[in-house]
Image (cartoon, rainbow, N blue to C red):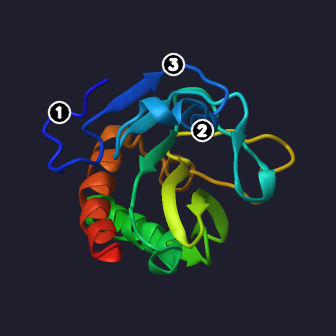
C-alpha cells in the first residue's frame, strides 16, 4: 500500500498493509529491529486490537482506520508529555477541516462524538533510563462502521453512524499524518 501524494518528510513513507492481522501494535513490537522511523502499519481488520489498559479494541472489517506508527524520537521521555493529547487535537483539527465535524477530547486518549467514543489512542514508549528508544502510537478511528458489539453499542459510535455518510479513510489518514508530522517534530525539538 502506498499513500500517493503524501506531503511528509518521513511519516508514512514506509507503509506496511495487512488485510487482516492480530494487532498492528504487536506487529511493530515483534518486528521493531527491521522497521524504520515513521513506518505506518495499517490493517483492514485487527483480530486482537488493543486499547489502553489492555482493553480490546473492536473494529469491523474494512470499515475503520486501525493503524500504528513507529517513531524513534531520540529525546528524553519528559519531552513527550502531552503527546497523546496532541495526537487527539490533530484528529479534531483534521476532521473539522475535512468534514466540519466537531469532536471532543476525553483526556488523555479518547475522541468523543455525540457523547460516544469514536477514537482511541494508545502511546507506548520503550525507555533506556530517561531516553526514549522508540515510541509506538496505535490509533483506532471508527469511520464507516454501523453495527457495534452488544457490550459497547451504548458507548461507541462512528462518523458514518452519526452522519449517515460514507467517509474516505485514506483522506483522513493522509491529513492526519501530514499535520501530525509537523506537531511531532515541534514536540521533540
Q: Residue at x 50, y 56 (%)?
A: 135
* Disc 1: which residue: 4
The crowding category of the residue bearing disc 3, from other C-alpha atoms within 10 Å (few below 14, some 14 to 19, many at least 20), is few
In the picture, the disc for residue 19 is 3
Q: Is residue 179 above or below residue 21?
A: below
The numbered dot on residue 137 is none
Disc 1 and disc 2: Cα gap in Å? 26 Å
Label 3 residue SS: loop
Cα–Cα span, label 1 and label 3: 19 Å
In the image, 39 versus 172, the foreground residue is 39
**From this viewpoint, is residue 111 visible?**
yes
Depth check, mark 1 against mark 2: the one in front is 2
Q: Is residue 102 visible?
A: no
Give me the residue at 59% from left, 61% from top.
127
Q: Badge 2 is on which residue?
A: 29
Q: Quick one: 142 or 25, which is closer to the camera?
A: 25
- Disc 1 vs disc 2: Cβ atoms closer than 8 Å? no
Earlier in the chain: of badge 1 and badge 2, it is 1
Label 2: how many Cα within 10 Å (few below 14, some 14–19, many 20+): some
**Tag 2, which secondary structure?**
helix
Q: Disc 1 or 3, which lies upstream in sequence?
A: 1
Amino acid at each position: 500500500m502506498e499513500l500517493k501524494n503524501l506531503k511528509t518528510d518521513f511519516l508514512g513513507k514506509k507503509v506496511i498493509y495487512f488485510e487482516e492481522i492480530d494487532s498492528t501494535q504487536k506487529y511493530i513490537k515483534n518486528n521493531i529491529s527491521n522497521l524504520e522511523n515513521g513506518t505506518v502499519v495499517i490493517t483492514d481488520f485487527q483480530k486482537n486490537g488493543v486499547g489502553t489498559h489492555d482493553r480490546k479494541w473492536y473494529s469491523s472489517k474494512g470499515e475503520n482506520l486501525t493503524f500504528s506508527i513507529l517513531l524513534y524520537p531520540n529525546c528524553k521521555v519528559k519531552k513527550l508529555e502531552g503527546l497523546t493529547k496532541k495526537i487527539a487535537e490533530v484528529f479534531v483539527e483534521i476532521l473539522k477541516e475535512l468534514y466540519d465535524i466537531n469532536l471532543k477530547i476525553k483526556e488523555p486518549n479518547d475522541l468523543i462524538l455525540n457523547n460516544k467514543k469514536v477514537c482511541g489512542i494508545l502511546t507506548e514508549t520503550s525507555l533506556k533510563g530517561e531516553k526514549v528508544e522508540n515510541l509506538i502510537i496505535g490509533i483506532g478511528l471508527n469511520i464507516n462502521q454501523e453495527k457495534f458489539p452488544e457490550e459497547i453499542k451504548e458507548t461507541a459510535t462512528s462518523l458514518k453512524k452519526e452522519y449517515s455518510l460514507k467517509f474516505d479513510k485514506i483522506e483522513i489518514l493522509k491529513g492526519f499524518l501530514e499535520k501530525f508530522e509537523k506537531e511531532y517534530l515541534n514536540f521533540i525539538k
